[in-house]
Image (cartoon, grey):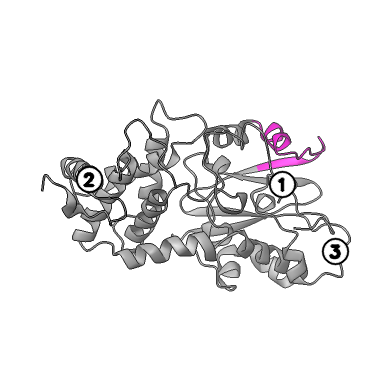
Amino acid sequence: MHDHDDHHHHDNHFSDMQARVKALETVLTQKGLIDPAAIDAIVETYETKVGPRNGARVVAKAWSEPDFADWLSRDATAAIASLGYGGRQGEHMRAVFNTAATHNLVVCTLCSCYPWAVLGLPPVWYKAPPYRSRAVIDPRSVLEEFGLTLPQTKKIRVWDSTAELRYIVIPERPEGTEGLDQEALADLVTRDSMIGTGLAKPVGAGR
Amino acid sequence: MNAHEPSNLLAGSPELPKSVEGDPVFAEPWQAEAFAMTVRLHEKGVFSWSEWAEALSRELYQPGRCADGSDYFDCWVAALSRLVTELSITSEAQLDHLTRSWQRAAEATPHGQPILLENDPAL
């Protein structure tokens, strides 16, 4: 990352935020509350290992295995943990299923609670005030801005996440995917489709 | 790329940091560090995730925050600072002191050398 501050060019310069984070790190390390190796490991996990692919596998399995879908609808926390995707924050998960009649949309109006274990880190727009406020008030127009126009007859349910309860949307399985295995199905599941701001991709749309 | 990837006001604010694979994660390393420290403190039982969410929410709803959310991690750092101060792990004064010390250390460190706190000439 470049430092865009070119008013006074020093060899090294810490922005207020950089320095503040270093200060926190210094204090917390001195108190024995954090250690650099653990911090690096967490960053690496969230940057590379966790991501929407975990959630996509959950969705693909639910599409393929009715028993799993049933478990997911009753106890998403346990069903998702069975695939090895556990939440670090000990939060409970709930899976909300899109149907022909209902579309589900997830938001966190309070801050930006997000199912990190299955979706990785939230996109910027999820954290931004316009989405947080408007998704509840006028979900239909928010979805239109995402290029998703739903028929007026389709009901939209908005789920407001909390620190204790996070939601994942199980999108509808696209047409013509009967012959696909779970790996191929997972490729059709986008991050946005699991937040509810998109749909699963049609077959042949590519990655 | 997601065909539905929005290119609109909600998603396309130019001020918002973007990152790997089109999915903005951390715009700068300090954001990742702040995030990871918070996760670690929670793992260690220093605070509950609800306490954290409440602290973060309080900062996000302060007047004068950017409408596009581009100061999200600034809020994050403010919330973390406030929480550890409230928990008497450190004080605001000590954090401010260390912040300035790190800035002096950075300026005093020749290019290419690791920036260490002991490089602060005022120490």
Residue at 42% x, 30% y: name it: B65
Q: Depth check: give the residue in front, A200 or B52.
A: A200
Badge 1 local density, few (<14 within 10 Å), some, or many (20+)?
many
Q: Which residue is mark 3?
A: A177
Given contact means CB atoms under 8 Å apart, are the residues at marks 2 and 1 in contact? no
Report whether mark 1 lies on the same chain as mark 3: yes
- Nearest to N terminus: mark 1 or mark 3: 3
Given contact means CB atoms under 8 Å apart, are the residues at marks 1 and 3 in contact? no
Q: Which residue is mark 2?
A: B85
**SS class of the residue under badge 3?**
loop
In percent of width and height, residue A43 lies at 43, 60
Can you tell which quarter of the image residue A95 is in?
bottom right
Q: Depth check: give the residue in front, B33 or B51.
A: B33
Q: Which residues are magenta?
A: A138-157
In percent of width and height, residue A198 lies at 72, 47
Badge 3 local density, few (<14 within 10 Å), some, or many (20+)?
some
Q: Depth check: give the residue in front, A75 or A30.
A: A30
Residue at 66% x, 49% y: name it: A192
Q: Which residue is mark 1?
A: A198
CA distance separating discs 2 and 1: 41 Å
Magenta stretch holds residue A150: yes
Answer yes or no: is residue B121 visible: yes
The chain that hosts pointer 3 is A
Residue type indicated by callout 2: Thr
The chain that hosts pointer 2 is B
In percent of width and height, residue B100 lies at 20, 41
In percent of width and height, residue A74 lies at 63, 63
Q: Which mark, by number, is residue A79?
A: none
Which residue lies most toward the right here?
A176
Above or below for A167 versus A66: above
For the C terminus of chain A, the image quarter is bottom right
Answer yes or no: is residue A65 visible: no
